Image (tube, rainbow, N blue to C red):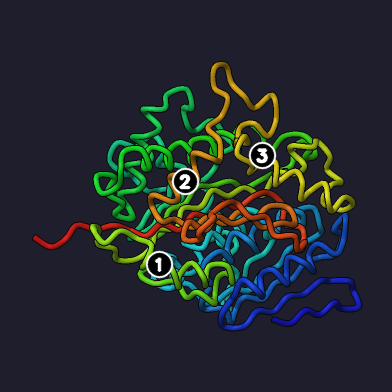
Amino acid sequence: MSILKKQNKELRFSFNKDLTVFNAEDAISRLAWERQPSAPLMIDLSACMHLDIGTGSLLGNGLRRYASVPSIKVMVPEPNDSLSDFWFLEYTRSGIAFSLASYATEIHSPSRDITNQIRDYYTKGRSKLPGLIELSEHLWAGQNFCLLKGIDKPIIDFSNLSRFRDMFIGLSKTVSMDPSLYSTTSYNEIIQLVYEGLQNIYDHAGKKPLALNTRILTYLSLKYYKTIKSKSWDKSFDGYLDRIYEYLPTSHKYDGWIELVINDDGVGIAARQSQDPEIYWTDDDKEIETLTAALSSGGSIKLLLQEGVRARDPGYGFAKISDSLRAMGAFLKLRTGRLIAYFDPTLKDSKYEVSGDLLGYMPGTTLQIIIPRRVREPA
């Protein structure tokens, strides 16, 4: 990746064939140089034919703060008219296309202006899944993939957990996640985690201390991967891959990985908890302490703010969620603000670990869970 700041103050990024997490994090750091972005932005992805796991939401979230600059121009590889094949595999599944549709002022392929094509396709969903017709305008689904957009809008009925469970099971069928192959307790805990994570986005992601009327992008996605290249994603994941097959019970058969992502580019955990939007720019220790407290044994996604707790509903707590991660052998990565936290069930004393290394400021929060996919033994 190369970065060039031209005489006219335009900030330019040019990416190579493979977009790695390292490249995306480097871009996020440079996008965070300015407290109040003012320079026009030019992003050249025209040579980028592969986006590593996690890079789409990472780079996409970084664009949100630049929505107020004079222009965000993006160059992308040539898609076909239906935005299928390679484009679907790399740009739709990664989530980056949704961010481009939301924030880019111009999108060009090598041969044409495709701004309207991208905006039209990613503004309104068109996928119809059995039992989920009411979500079709917010849903994109294909082979081994689904994405439900607009979680900050009233598209989900959070008053009915049973109905929410049916919704999640319907979505998980796109990645062939069979609930009967997991214990009822661990599967229900994953559903509870998703429920609270999405409810928290609806309650808080676009609200104070985020500036009034800030436009944000929010979504839940599920993806299936046959393999994940360890070095392409995260160094903490390398050790997990080294240990996971000895950790998993031999009573089940596995054939790849399900990635569950809950993403928003809104206020972020630390600012939401402290109600201080300056925390990402001034107070290093406070941001670390805030996230660490949220992940503590008494912490909860919904206890980050007092007003987030609903009547007789104190929040589920990360302690119980960790039990589910252990039972499923699932790896968790949380990227929010300037921090990353992990949970690796294969470690002897597995617990949530917050990295003390501050990264570039990324708006919002991306929660990724990597679950070994269980399948039935052949008859």
Mark closer to the observer (2, 1): 2
Mark closer to the observer (3, 1): 3
Kind of element beneath mark 2 = strand
- Image quarter (top left, top right, bottom left or bottom right) of the N terminus: bottom right
Crowd around label 3: few <14 · some 14–19 · many ≥20 (10 Å): many
> Looking at the image, which residue is at 66% across and 39% down?
205
Position of 18 compared to 70: left or right? Answer: left
Identify the amino acid type marked 1. Ser
Question: Residue 131: which quarter of the image?
Answer: top left
Residue 316 percent coordinates (x, y): 52, 32
Position of 249 compared to 219: left or right? Answer: left
Residue 130 percent coordinates (x, y): 27, 40
Residue that carries the numbered disc 1 in the rendered image: 84
- Which label was assigned to residue 148? 2
Crowd around label 1: few <14 · some 14–19 · many ≥20 (10 Å): some
- Furthest toward the front, the residue is 348
Q: CA distance from mark 2 to mark 1?
A: 18 Å
